[in-house]
Amino acid sequence: MSRLSSILLSAFAIPMALSMSSCQQSTAKEVQSVEIADTQDSEAAVQAVADEPAKTITMAFTGDILMGTNLPDSSYITRDRGRSLFADCDSIIRSADLAIGNLEGACYYGTKAEITKNISSGKCFVFRMPGDHAQRLVDAGFDAVGIANNHAGDCGATGRRLTQENLRNVGIAFSGQKGGAEEAYVERNGVKYGYLAFAASCGNTNDMNNAAARDALIKKMRPQCDILVVSFHGGAEGTSACHVPFKSETFYGENRGDVHKFAHECIDQGVDIVIGHGPHVPRAVELYNGHFIAYSLGNFCAPFRMSIAGATGLAPLLCVQLDAKTGEFQSGKIHSLKQVKGVGPRLDATCAAARNIGTLTKQDFPNGKLVVEDDGTITMK
Ligand SMILES: [Zn+2]
């Protein structure tokens, strides 16, 4: 049995205890209902038991996480080896029932690598986070990461294998790689979460441009979880790519997907929430048939080797409350952080990330149902 299996099993054991206590509560409610229903028919009594208040869950999401890189050398790692990277936001991430980010690179011990890119020009970067930095994700409160992106394969099949081993060893679930790491399941507080990460034109990852394969994965996972999450790494990149274009995007000659079509189709297939990243800048949020979509959460942790100028320096941390039974959006909050070079994301009292997403949401979805207040509070119109 793998270590992850035992972690997951122990995660199942706690909810069992929790559900036992909730059973005891419902027994008490049942007695009460029967007494009240003395003069009513028995159907009404059964209904009273069934109408327990819906349970709300809180999920936290971030965009790209690159906790430094030891390629080309260790000058791109913080002096405390990443221990302070998430100091300003770990309490927020930990307070969520489940937290997911996009791991934008390999992360493993040692130097083994099959570099898959031509880095001689100095313009193409290879991202390899030191192995001990996986623990920083755990310490910050992340439960799962997406490994479907354009840097997870920077160190070849060896890097992918060692990264997955490393994540498994620290107990972080992951999704996104064909050949056995397509999907992830995590149970927290009695709720079973399924997670599927997709990317566009990123080698051997779950492909957001292959609708048939996507729908087959969703169909397989949907009955096995309460909440089904999809993330995608798609869309063009940079400060000229802030808007949802409502069509396929091409970048570096690659098909980076039609993010709007993809997100809507996922929800049509039964997905509860869709979270995007890849453009390195935030984009709008949308409510579609009661379900939440974030089109890009931009960069979240980029202390080195990524541009942090303008909107690329915004680091939104999204928290959403969903109905645990239906997966429908209830409320949300965008915590605004910004990149500090060599340090990591730090809270931003000017709330620039939230204001940016609020403005884009008004522009791109003028008839949409969501409002993002300047302080980051997300409400329904
Ligand atoms: Zn990327």
Image (spheres, rainbow, N blue to C red):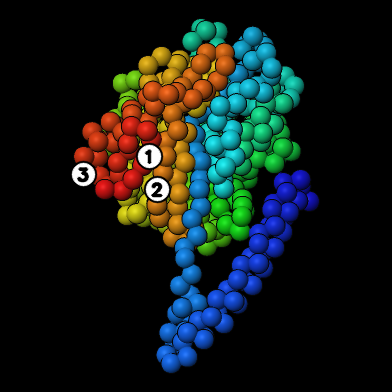
Q: Marks 3 and 2, how far apart in space?
A: 18 Å
Q: Is residue 328 above or below residue 281?
A: below
Point out the residue furthest to the left here. 367
Q: Determine whether label 3 and label 2 are within 8 Å by CB.
A: no
| Closest to the observer, 171 or 261 | 171
Q: Determine whether label 1 and label 2 are within 8 Å by CB.
A: yes
- Between marks 3 and 2 in the image, the one whose residue lies nearer the viewer: 2
Tell me which residue sits at (34%, 54%) in the image: 290
Residue 322 percent location from the top left of the image:
45, 52
Task: From the image, tell me which residue sits under label 1.
Answer: 377
Task: From the image, tell me which residue sits under label 3.
Answer: 367
Residue flagged by tag 2: what amino acid is it?
Ser
Residue flagged by tag 3: what amino acid is it?
Asn
Other residues around mark 1 within 10 Å, as few (<14) / some (14–19) / many (≥20): some
Residue 177 percent location from the top left of the image:
57, 39
Residue 331, disc: 2
Other residues around mark 3 within 10 Å, as few (<14) / some (14–19) / many (≥20): few
Secondary structure beneath dot 3 equals loop
Secondary structure beneath dot 2 equals strand
* Residue 10 visible in the snapshot: yes
Which of the 4 image quadrants contains residue 262? top left
Tell me which residue sits at (74%, 38%) in the image: 169
Secondary structure beneath dot 1 equals strand
Residue flagged by tag 1: what amino acid is it?
Thr
